[in-house]
Amino acid sequence: MVAVARPSRSAYNWYRLLVLSFVIGIVAGLGAILFNWLLDLGHQLFLTGIAHYRPPGLAAEGGQAVARFGPYARLLIPVATTLGGLLAGWLVFTFAPEAEGHGTDAVIRAYHEEGGRIRGRVPLIKTLASAITLGSGGSGGREGPIAQIGAGLAAVSSYLLRLSDTERRTLVMAGAGGGIGAVFHAPLGGALFAAEVLYAKLDTENDVLVPSIISAVTAYSVAGYVTGFGSLFQLRADAYSQPEELPFYLLLGVLAAGAAWFFVKLFYGTQAWFRELRMPVYLKPALGGLITGVLGAFLPQVLSGGYGWMQLVFENKLPFLILLLMALGKMFATSMTIGSGGSGGVFGPSVFTGAALGAAYGQMLAHLFPGLGVNPVDFALVGMASFFAGAAKTPLSSIVMVTEMTGGYGLLVPLMLASFTAFVLVPHTVTLYRSQVPERIDSPVHAHEYIRMALASLAERGLPIPSDVPLPQIARLLETGQPVPLDPEGNEIAFTLRLDPGHPWAGRRIAELGLPPSVLVISVLREKADKVIVPRGHTQLEEGDTLILVGPPEAPGDVARMLGKNGRQESD
């Protein structure tokens, strides 16, 4: 009789996670259907019912690419946006303040810092508030709401199933990726986005990718029965066949980087202005809605998601000046809508801005170089991806999502060139998602992995330190401030050094300290952020940090002599 090996506990947990990802995909798909239905209802109640304005729609969603204005529409648009902002603000700040803003940032923060925990009421409040904000004409996108809806439903399901923090975090991102894949008809792009958006540098959360793919494929399939399958936009883009155009695409990447940098600064500058504004918080979205509505009365392209107007961009039916105004106006309107506390996403406005900017740039090239045969639609498509790649630090998912949304697979070469150009040129600290961390090593989720590596390096120096001892335990041993022997002979000790205000090391990078080779910084305890930082050479120290160092018994004296009796480093 042949014995059959039973799967290990870790393998069982992995299989269970994949099955749950499928279930979460079903839930996310249903959530996308519900959100799209509520959004259409919001348009009918506010923009059409109050303002007598029907924005152009997408054929893929049963709409027509024609805008319709009724009597006094331009006068009534600000009424609709203000009322929508008032209702959404009251709803959010009364029941779930964390549903404020563009949503995706809250999901990223939940992953890194909160064990994937999202309150059960958040998906409901986010759904209603976003449908009201966007349905009344507020400028925003669908990805933020649907990401928080999918992630929130996954968090609630994980709580009911009593899953671990690791499983909950993974399912939260799978739910976000599934919702995004369903609402944008981009399952692979949604899955990649969930794995890539967590980090500002070119890093991905590999453990999230497979569950996100399962969730996104399932969610897209569920939603497709109602909204249909295929690309979201219809366009006739060329296939890449003219290498002489590559310098122009490279320049588009540079322009997109500059515009993305401007958008991020404008967005958070506007948000800071609203936070300093002395008025009840639930009224601020109404003010943002009023400003957006006044702008929308003159430039209706910036209202709501604007996807129907994007379809007209891809049909090359809008003139150069209107395209430029659309790009600038969308950035301003989105900053006012979401920066004031309204509920919506920033992916939609970003691809809208990038498409308008790219189309205007393409029209200019076609005019300046008529013999080159430039198709402005090609540059609109590339502008979409490159702008968002720079603004959100997600080049891979931006490329894939744009190709899935438009069917423009033939332009992968210029897409890659322009998108990565924009990504490289925009500093990783300038991003629409402030909850991103630079790399995996900077995430609290992975801190213990690198702590174990640090302890392993100490063990290689002959120290009997168990590999499963987390660094916070060592930190507690050092609370007295006295050196702690790390081996029976006392050849190596651990000691602390606090950077009080005015300390000469504050503001310096660890590589610049000039420590002896025998002294190793194994951790930085950042008090004001309440977190443990795994140090690297380029880690910049701040006042209030506590360093945990390891070295020979004479190391504390050597460091003290370096700093000098007056607190100044002698080598300065």
Image (tube, grey):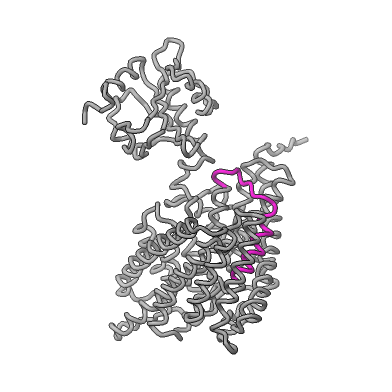
Given residues 134 and 419, the one toward you in this image is 134
In the current view of this chain or complex, which residue is farthest to the bottom? Answer: 71
Given residues 295 and 366, the one toward you in this image is 295
Name which residue lies at 48% across and 35% down: 532
Q: Position of residue 159 (x, y in %)?
A: 71, 45
Given residues 462 and 190, the one toward you in this image is 190
Q: Quadrant for residue 540, please give it.
A: top left
Relative horizontal placement of residue 29, taking residue 376 as reference (left or right): right
Q: Position of residue 190 (x, y in %)?
A: 56, 61
Given residues 242 and 78, the one toward you in this image is 78
Name which residue lies at 69% across and 47% down: 158
Quadrant location, the N terminus? top right
Above or below, comparing residue 359 to residue 161 in the picture: below
Relative horizontal placement of residue 430, taking residue 164 as reference (left or right): left
Above or below, comparing residue 239 to residue 470 in the picture: below
Q: Position of residue 421 (x, y in %)?
A: 35, 62
Above or below, comparing residue 481 to residue 168 in the picture: above
Q: From this viewpoint, is residue 128 visible?
A: yes
Quadrant location, the C terminus? top left
Q: From this viewpoint, is residue 185 visible?
A: no
Q: Quadrant for residue 376, please give it.
A: bottom left
The residue segment tinted magenta is 111-134
In the current view of this chain or complex, which residue is farthest to the right? Answer: 1
Question: Which SS type dominates the magenta stretch?
Answer: helix
Above or below, comparing residue 125 to residue 511 in the picture: below
Query: Is 120 covered by the magenta stretch?
Result: yes
In the current view of this chain or complex, which residue is farthest to the front? Answer: 278
Q: Position of residue 61 (x, y in %)?
A: 63, 77
